[in-house]
Amino acid sequence: MIGFLADWATLLLRWFHITLGIAWIGASFFFVWLDISFKKRAQMNKGVSGTSWMVHGGGFYHVEKYLVAPEALPSDLHWFKWEAYLTWISGFALLISIYYFNATAYLIDPAVLALVPWQAIAISIGSLLVGWMIYDGLCKSPIGREQILLVPAVFILICGAAYLFTLVFSGRGAFIHVGAFVGTIMAANVFMVIIPNQAKITKALLADLPPDPKLGQIGKQRSLHNNYLTLPVLVMMVSNHHPMLFSHDKSWLIVALILIVGAMVRHFINRHDAGVPAKKILWTLGVAAVALLALIVMTAPKPVDDSVEVLPNEEIFAIVNQHCTVCHSGSPRHEDHDEAPKGIKFNSLAEVIVQKNAVLQQSVNSNAMPLGNGTAMSKAEREALGAWLRAQ
């Protein structure tokens, strides 16, 4: 019953996180489009730099954008911030409930680095804080004033973090931390820069003082960064369902290619929304396609070694019993599970055959299972299991 209730708690937390993420991403996409859509009109109110006309849901909308801010602010000014704050809070809560409470299963791989849970958790939290400080420092440095320098610098920062994570955590833990790393940067952009700058502009207006236009420019820069990072971070956050990504021995390179695909697609959409003809920016989709093809090739299963002997059923079941039924059985022996995950049980070879494709993906073509390779399943055992499964 405890495991059942824990599953429901995790499900509800995921539901909450996904819902808020959709709201945050939707707002990001909309406001970048909106900012691009503004046009100068023959008649505009004082201080307005452009307007945009839209139609949706049977109604027409007319939006104005001020160069800095209007002379007076309405009492019902809406701030777009809680979508970002709660997305990060719920995401961090998931990190705690899944990866911190089950660090030995999901976060630590003794074959990578022998850590105790508190050490892994400390590295996790520290890396998120340090990552934000380095990113923020880059944006505030002279590099931040030149987009042509800042973009590759941020790209190198994320790829470097991805590489360092592979030296510390399990494959699953390293990849999810890249998502947490980028997500923390995005949320901190809102909490530490965008909203405070808007608050300073509002305070100046209420005090009848001219607001600093640089505050809005800085906020727009960070908002645009968030927009370009959205597509890659989405893949990182669902990566635990796809071991072909996180189990690769060069998963940091997988991260780099995902960043390129996401950024190029986002750039094409943004520039096309700005009125640039598609044929002038098709190169971005070409780059994304090449990067995606590279991803597919890199993550493709390795050629099958036909020379591996197909072992007798008794020996295969001994391998399954040693490495799989620790969790996947009617009575799991793993301390973190009081019932079989997802209800999958391997009490017989017939049950293993039913899950043939999943076992091949999780334990043969990758080392995603056993979790953290806690039972030290060898390469030879994986190959033997794969040969037997393919013979069925």
Image: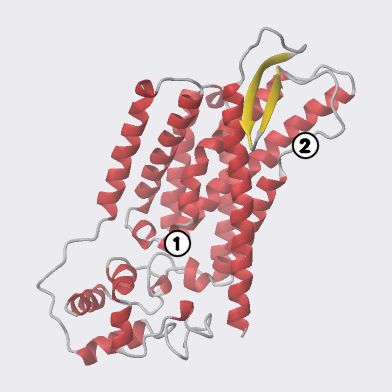
x then y, percent, for residue 199: 79, 32
Q: Quadrant of residue 159?
A: top left
CB under 8 Å between discs 2 and 1:
no
The mark nearer the N terminus, 2 or 1, is 2
Relative horizontal placement of residue 261, taking residue 379 as reference (left or right): right
Q: Which residue is drawn at 29% across and 85% down?
A: 319
Q: In which quarter of the image is the C terminus?
A: bottom left
Question: As displayed, is residue 99 above or below residue 335?
Answer: above
Q: Where is residue 57 in the image (x, y as percent from the top left)?
A: 64, 38
> Please, what secondary structure does the residue beneath circle 2 have?
loop
Residue drawn at point x = 21 percent, y = 74 percent: 383
* Dot 2 amino acid type: His
- Which residue is label 2 attached to? 78
- Position of 204 compared to 269: left or right? right
Toward the top, the furthest residue is: 42
SS at badge 1: helix
Structural distance between the alpha carbons of marks 2 and 1: 36 Å
Q: Report the coloring of the rendering.
A: secondary structure
Please tell me which residue lies in front, 223 or 164: 223
Task: Identify the residue at horizontal 48%, vertical 68% (top origin).
Answer: 106
- Kindly identify the amino acid type of the residue bearing the numbered disc 1: Asn
Q: Tell which of 76 and 121 is nearer to you.
A: 76
Name which residue lies at 40% across and 45% down: 258
Whether residue 169 is visible here, answered yes or no, is no
Is residue 164 in view from this perspective?
yes
Q: Residue 240 carries which label?
A: 1
